[in-house]
Amino acid sequence: MLRTFTIVLLSAGGIFAALPQDTSKPKPQPVTSGRQDKADQDSLKQASKIGDSYFAKWASTTQSNLIELSRIAQQRATDPEVKRFATMMVEDHQACVQKLVPFTSGSGRPGASGSVPPVNGSSNGNGKPDQAPAATRTNASGELDHAALFDELGQQCLLTARNELASKQGAEFDRCYTMMMVASHSMSGDMLVVFQRHVTPELAVVLADAQTKTSAHLATAKDLAQRLERKDIPARKAE
């Protein structure tokens, strides 16, 4: 066994010896000047800032949509608890949007702006369904404008939700809005978890705070939805 092992080692040594050996001197590493180091650092900081602006923009757009839908619920909800919940949504998400403003680089809407036309089935006056306004998809350099794209996507999502709420009345509206809050806060919570992995520590702190509030809102929305469902059971049986 030892003899066999020795032969294997000698054979391996022969193979390595037969391989071309690099006898050249080590290549000197390029020397970077302090000015170049600073330029590289500035470039990294700029890239981080741009990345933060994209994540903050989408988080802000999501928060703004929740504000818009909750403002509708403040006016049209019939259940007192749903109205109180909607008021809390407006206040808490407005606070979140304000904290995101420094990271959005001033692009797009910093908060709920009401840029989507009122939803009533044919608000444009020609009998056709409402449509979200088109956004500019390219910037001055001809590249894709991500901020404008986020705006357009956010407005389309808001339009769909508002059209859905417009078709509901009374207790049905309350249930629809509450379930929207359950679904949207569930997805928003996952989004905030993922975003925190890819942003700067400064923005991560803001997103972590938003995630905490989102989790609390989700729990409240679930409890409210269950209560509304139990409340509605006797009425369905009577029908």
Image (cartoon, helix red, strand yellow):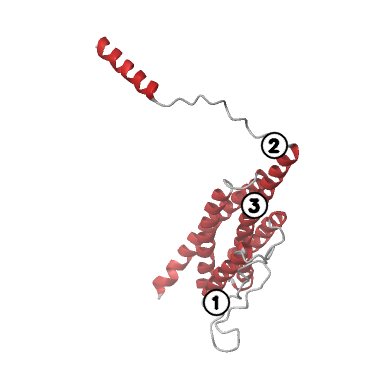
Viewer-side residue, 230 vs 153: 153
Relative to 21, residue 130 above or below:
below
From the top left corner, tell me how far across and down residue 168 is, in percent.
52, 76
* Quadrant in which the N terminus appears: top left
Q: Which mark is residue 92?
A: none
Residue in the image at 75% along x and 40% along y: 35
Name the residue carrying label 2: 32
Of residues 198 and 235, the one drawn nearer to the viewer in this rendering? 198
Please say whether residue 80 is visible from this viewpoint. Answer: no
Q: Residues within 10 Å of mark 3 (few under 14, many from 20)?
A: many
Q: Is residue 35 visible?
A: yes
Q: x, y (%) of residue 71?
A: 64, 69
Q: Quadrant of residue 96?
A: bottom right
Q: Residue at x 68, y 55 (%)?
A: 100
* Separation (CA) of disc 3 from disc 2: 28 Å
Residue placed farthest to the right in the image?
35
Q: Earlier in the sequence, mark 3 or mark 2?
A: 2
Work out whether mark 1 precedes mark 3 in sequence or the reverse, and give the earlier one: 3
Question: Mark 1 or mark 3: which is in front?
Answer: 3
Tag of residue 166: 1
For residue 165, side relative to residue 52 (left or right): left
Q: Amino acid at mark 2?
A: Thr
- CA neighbours of label 2 inside 10 A, class few (<14), some (14 to 19), many (20+): few
Instruction: Name the element at disc 3.
Output: helix
Q: State how far apart marks 1 and 3 are (Cα).
A: 35 Å
Residue 52, labelled with which disc?
3
Callout 1 secondary element: helix
The residue shown at (71%, 46%) is: 42
Q: Amino acid at mark 3?
A: Asp
